[in-house]
Image (tube, helix red, strand yellow):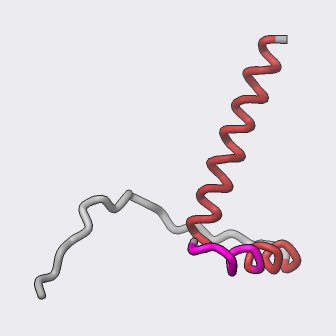
Amino acid sequence: MAFNLNVERKESVNKCVRFPIPLMNKIETVLKDYDISFSQFVIQACEYALDELETEEVNKVKH
């Protein structure tokens, strides 16, 4: 079997983040029910938070 490189890999950077233990426990409990890594969860949660923040900022400007 030949070795194939994954050309769809996105560029990424490592960051060290400290989580409060109770929050980490909640996240790990939820992730047990989903086929998703902790990193994928954090990325999606950050993207969601940024999208919501941008929506709130747009709504503030409209009012």
Q: Is residue 43 above or below residue 61?
A: below
Q: Is residue 33 magenta?
A: yes
Q: Is residue 37 left or right of residue 58?
A: left
Number of numbered discs: 0
- Image quarter in which the C terminus is found: top right
- Image quarter in which the N terminus is found: bottom left
Range of residues picked out in magenta: 29-35
Q: Is residue 18 magenta?
A: no
Compare residues 59 and 34 and report the one nearer the observer: 34
Q: Residue 51 placed where, x, y %?
A: 66, 38
Q: Is residue 52 left or right of residue 36?
A: right
On the image, which quarter does residue 40 sit in?
bottom right
On the image, which quarter does residue 24 sit in?
bottom right
On the image, which quarter does residue 16 sit in?
bottom right
The residue drawn where x is 38% and y is 58% is 11
Q: Which residue is situated farthest in the right direction here?
A: 22
Q: Which residue is situated farthest in the front direction here?
A: 33
The residue drawn where x is 74% and y is 36% is 53
Compare residues 11 and 63 and report the one nearer the observer: 63
Q: Is residue 26 above or below residue 52?
A: below
Q: Is residue 21 above or below residue 52?
A: below
The residue drawn where x is 73% and y is 38% is 52
Q: Is residue 27 left or right of residue 34?
A: right
Q: Is residue 54 above or below residue 20?
A: above
Q: Which residue is situated farthest in the left direction here?
A: 2
Compare residues 30 and 3 and report the one nearer the observer: 30
Q: Which residue is situated farthest in the top direction here?
A: 63
Q: Residue 14 placed where, x, y %?
A: 52, 68
Q: Residue 8 placed where, x, y %?
A: 30, 59
